[in-house]
Image (tube, helix red, strand yellow):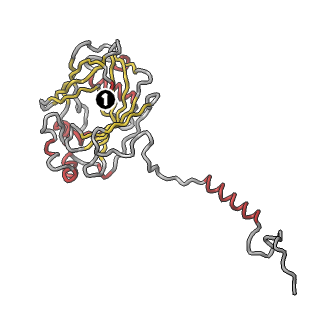
Amino acid sequence: MSPLPNPISTNFCPSNSAFPPPDLILASLSLLFLFSSSFKPHLPNLKTPSHLPSSCSQTPRRLFFLKSPSLPTKITAMSKNPALQFSSPQSLSDWLKPRLPYDSLSSWGVRSGTKNIHNLWLELSEGETSLSDDSPPIRTVHVATIRIRDASGRRILIESHQELSDGSVRPRLRPLSEKMKPGEAVDDAIHRAIREELGSVVPDASSSVRIVPGSYKQKVEERPSASYPGLPACYILHSVDAWVDGLPDGEFCTEEEEYGNFGEAEFAEKAVSVRRHFWKWADDNSDGLV
C-alpha cells in the first residue's frame, strides 16, 4: 500500500498544475487595480451642482439661502434645448397652449400687470429665460438683485411700482432687479442694471457704484410667475448690497426703453415694456425683502 500524502504539504501549486503560482495571481490583481483606478471614462455630469436644488418644482414660495465669500466671476450660460427654440411668438404660443392650465395663456398681456407672449419669446431669444419641456413648463431665470443702501446704511432703495407701456401699473416693492444674460458676470449685471434703470439720475454707473464687501448671497425662489399667469417660475437670485452715489434723497422716477435695442422690432413693438420705474427709500427689513 502506498503511503498517504502529507496533509500539510507546502507545495500548493506544483509546476504541472493548471493554476498559476500565488505571486503571479497577486501581481495580476495589483496591475488590474492600478489600471482600473487610473482609467476613468468621461461621463456627462448628471447631477445638479450641490449649491442648487436638484429641480425647480411648482411648490410656491420655497426658498433656498446660500452664501458665497465673493462674487462669482461668471454665470454659466443657461442651457438651450434645441427642441425649445421657437421661430416666432405664434409657434411658442402653439407649443404652450396644451401645456398650461386652461385659459391662462389668454390672460397674458390682458390682466393688469402681466406681459404677453411676445415678451416671453424675446426673453427666450436673448437667453434671459429657459423653459423646461414639462407640462406645465418651468421658466428659469437668473436675476441680479441690488440692495442699494443710503449713506447711513439704515435705508435701502425700493422700486415701489412700474408703469407699463399698455398704461397698467405693476406693484413691485422690491430692490432693483434685472434678468441676467447668459454667461454674464454678476458684477457686470449689477452695473448694467443700475445703468439701464437708474441711468437718468446716475449718469456714470461704473464710478458711482461700490459693492459692500462680503454681501453677496444666492437664493433660489420657486413661485408662480406674476408676469405670465399659470407658468411656474424658478428664480436664481444673485444679490448684493451696494452704495450708489448721486441718488435723490426722496422719492423719484426713472424711464427705460426695455426693448429699444432689440433687432426684432416687429415683435418688440408688440411686447409689454416698462416705461417708468418709481423709487423710494425704506427702512431696511432684511427678512421681508428679496
| Location of residue 53 in the rendering, given as x and y in whole percent from the top left corner | 39, 42
Q: In this view, does 167 lie above or below 120?
A: above
| Residue 259 figure quarter | top left
Disc 1, SS: loop
Q: Is residue 55 above or below residue 283?
A: below
Q: Residue at 19% x, 51% y: name it.
A: 97
Residue nearest the viewer, comparing 60 with 98:
60
The quadrant the N terminus occupies is bottom right
Residue nearest the viewer, comparing 43 with 264:
43
| Residue 175 figure quarter | top left
The quadrant the C terminus occupies is top left
Is 109 on the left-hand or right-hand side of 70? left
| Location of residue 202 in the rendering, given as x and y in whole percent from the top left corner | 29, 17
| Location of residue 212 in the rendering, given as x and y in whole percent from the top left corner | 41, 20
Q: Which residue does the numbered mark 1 point to in the structure image?
A: 290
Q: Residue at 87% x, 82% y: name it.
A: 3
Q: Which amino acid does label 1 sit on?
A: Val
Is 136 on the left-hand or right-hand side of 190? left
Farthest residue toward the bottom?
A: 1
Is 129 on the left-hand or right-hand side of 267? right
| Residue 75 figure quarter | top left
Q: Can residue 124 be seen in this view?
A: no
| Location of residue 31 in the rendering, given as x and y in whole percent from the top left corner | 69, 58
